[in-house]
Structure formats: C-alpha cells, structure tokens
Image (cartoon, rainbow, N blue to C red):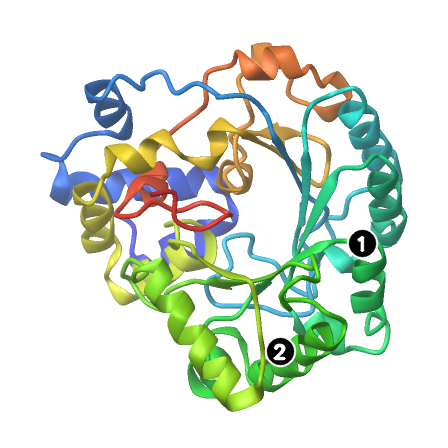
C-alpha cells in the first residue's frame, strides 16, 4: 500500500481519492457498500424526487484556505465560470419549476460576473442563496455586497465553525472570527436575521475533527445564545454538515490515521430516513465549466450525472434529469449518517 504521504500528495486527482477511500476499506470489508444499504431499504437505484434546487459552483477561487474545504478552494485557484456558461444557466432555468438558485464556490462573490448573474436571476423571480465565507464581505472590493444582497432579497448562508475565536481561527485561519463578526453585524444592521424582515441569514457548522456533528437544534440554540450574549448578533437558522472524506478532509484523515475509523463510523451510522432525504434527489449541481453533477461532492470527484441525462448545462433537459439514476460511491455514507447531511443541514 502507498505511504500516507504519497497518498496525500496524489489527492489532486479525483479518481485517486475514490481509490484511497475504497482501498482503506480493507480493514472494514465486512461492512456493506452504499448501494447495498440502499437496496436493503428499496432505494436502489437512487432516483430524483424532482429538480427543485439549481446549485452552481461559480469557481474555486477564494480569499481563504480552510482546513475542511471539500472544494480545495484558495487564492491560487484559477477555475472560474465564464459569462457564456452563466448564460447557459439562465437559459436552462427559463420555463422550469426550479425555485431556488444556490451559488457557491470558492467564494462565489469573487466571480467577475457574480453581480450581473444575481440581478438576472432576481428578475426571473427565483429565490437566491449565496454561500459566503463572511470574511470576503469585509474586504474593500466586496464590502458593499450586504446592501446588494438586501436589494435582491438574497438568502445569505455563511460558514462559522464555532462561536469562539479559538476554534474558528483554528479551522479557517487567524483573524477569521473577528472578520466574521464584523460581517454578521453589518448584515444584522441591514435587517438580516431580524424577525419580520424576510432577509434570511443562516450559519453553517462543520465539525473540526473526525466525528459527526452534534444535534442541529441544540447547536443552533447554543450559537444563538452565545452570539447574542457576546456580540448581540441574530441569525435565522444553523445547518450542521458532515465532513465527507474527500479533498482536504480526506488528507486530514490520512495524515491523522483516522480514515478507516471514520469510514466505519459513517457506515455504521447509516440512517434510512436520512437516505430518503439526501440532497441529490432534489438538486442538480453545475460545475464552473458547465458540467453537471448529482451533488457538489460528486462534482469534486468528477462524477458527472449519467450520460443519458445530458452532462453539460448547454444540454439541460429537466425531464431527463428527473428520470436519471443518481451516481453513488462510498463517500455517500457521509450524507446518510446519523441525522443526515445536506447543504441545508440535517435531513432528519
């Protein structure tokens, strides 16, 4: 078997990540494959319930380099969605019942066509979610975005690892917590997170280590209490997301010797109710280059939607996508463990 350092070095290749996940299952070979677990509960092959959410990764460029980032985003990433691909996305959305456009990255705000696209989608009457790292909103080039978000009724969903400075900075870099608080206060001042404003402000919690997130409702109440007490900050909801064993988190699991134990934990925590509500059943994921995936995690592993469904946004056909079979592998256990995990938090 390759050394851990050799495996970690090879993680830039998505196919290598899948090979590593599966090869490390040797120690837990008695445990089932994901498709077997789905078959046992009558969900295999996994089928969509209907595309409702149009999630777009508009580029891997980011002003941060977070330890848990499954996108492996950072300032040196050059992959960025072109205006032509954005236009294909607008064309695809026309005449569909898709109600939500979910913009992610990287830092989606750094795409040069970001504001134009938000304006165009807003004209279509679609609900818009922007997944922000918060710190980008404190930089000179982007510090007017909170007002822009308010103007277009954008729902802002932000990453905040914890309500303490130490844990937040440890996961996302020194100074992150203070900048995040500044951004949250500005959003609050504009009405975000305030009762009756209609301006939604949500936080996202990812565990720091090789364990599942705690109870979502309990964490939400803890965050609400502490952020209110410390900074007089309000927000609407908190989403817990399980770290999947890919990209930087897979590297962490390898280097810490926790991959096999973590995979075993995910598999043994399989929840049929969570499997029913996995996000790939009502979401389609569009990559920065226009290729289509069943979810954002499959996108990072370059597992495109099945060929018959059309694999590029220029060939978008909602009927074909609604009738496709969703592609799966062992990493999918991360979305079905415990209370489940999705971009909208726990599924149970």
Give whichever of 275, 211 is nearer the camera.
275
Residue at the extreme left of the image, as rendered = 30
Residue at the extreme bottom of the image, as rendered = 230
Residue at the extreme front of the image, as rendered = 196
| Residue 337 placement (x, y as % from top left) | 27, 45
Residue under the image location 70 percent in, 62 percent down: 197
* Residue 12: mark: none
Is any part of residue 184 visible from this angle? yes
Residue under the image location 85 percent in, 78 percent down: 140
Say if 229 sits above or below 104 in the image: below
* Residue 111: mark: 1
Rounded to the nearest whole Å, what is the CA distance between mark 1 and mark 2?
Answer: 20 Å
Q: Secondary structure at mark 2?
A: helix
- The quadrant of the image that shows the C terminus is top left
Say if 45 sits above or below 213 in the image: above
Give whichever of 117, 129 is nearer the camera.
129
Mark 2 or mark 1, which is nearer the start of the sequence? 1
| Residue 19 placement (x, y as % from top left) | 35, 38
Residue under the image location 30 percent in, 47 percent down: 339
Q: Secondary structure at mark 1?
A: loop
In the image, which is nearer the foreground, mark 1 or mark 2?
2
Q: Quadrant of residue 64?
A: bottom right
| Residue 319 placement (x, y as % from top left) | 63, 11
Is any part of residue 330 visible from this angle? no
Q: Quadrant of residue 18?
A: top left
> Answer yes or no: do the residues labelled 1 and 2 have beta carbons within 8 Å?
no
Q: Is residue 320 left or right of residue 303?
A: right
| Residue 45 placement (x, y as % from top left) | 36, 16
Q: Which residue is mark 2?
A: 180
Q: Is residue 134 left or right of residue 248?
A: right
């Amino acid at each position: 078997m390759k050394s851990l350092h050799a495996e970690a070095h090879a993680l830039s290749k998505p196919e290598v990540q899948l090979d590593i996940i599966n090869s490390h299952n040797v120690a837990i070979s008695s445990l089932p494959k994901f498709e077997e677990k789905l078959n046992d509960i009558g969900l295999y092959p996994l089928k969509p319930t209907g595309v409702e959410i149009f999630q777009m990764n508009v580029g891997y460029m980011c002003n941060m380099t977070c330890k848990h980032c499954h996108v492996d985003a950072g300032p040196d990433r050059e992959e960025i969605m072109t205006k032509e691909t954005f236009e294909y996305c607008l064309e695809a959305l026309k005449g569909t019942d898709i109600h939500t456009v979910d913009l992610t990255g990287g830092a989606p705000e750094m795409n040069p066509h970001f504001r134009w696209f938000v304006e165009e989608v807003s004209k279509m009457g679609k609900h818009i979610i922007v997944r922000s790292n918060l710190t980008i909103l404190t930089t000179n080039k982007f510090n007017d975005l909170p007002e822009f978000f308010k103007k277009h009724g954008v729902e802002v969903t932000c990453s905040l690892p914890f309500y303490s400075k130490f844990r937040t900075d440890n996961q996302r870099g020194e100074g992150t917590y203070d900048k995040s608080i500044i951004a949250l206060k500005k959003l609050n001042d504009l009405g975000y997170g305030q009762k009756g404003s209609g301006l939604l402000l949500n936080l996202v919690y990812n565990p720091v280590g090789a364990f599942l997130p705690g109870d979502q409702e309990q964490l939400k109440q803890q965050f609400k209490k502490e952020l209110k007490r410390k900074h007089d900050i309000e927000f609407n909801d908190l989403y817990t997301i399980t770290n999947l064993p890919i990209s930087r988190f897979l590297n962490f699991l390898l280097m810490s010797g926790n991959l096999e134990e973590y995979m075993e934990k995910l598999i043994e925590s399989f929840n049929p109710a969570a499997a029913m509500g996995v996000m790939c059943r009502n979401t389609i994921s569009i990559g920065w280059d226009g290729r289509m995936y069943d979810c954002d995690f499959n996108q990072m592993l370059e597992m495109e939607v099945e060929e018959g469904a059309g694999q590029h946004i220029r060939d978008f056909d909602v009927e074909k996508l609604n009738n496709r079979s969703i592609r799966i592998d062992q990493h999918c256990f991360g979305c079905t463990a415990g209370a489940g995990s999705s971009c909208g938090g726990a599924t149970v």
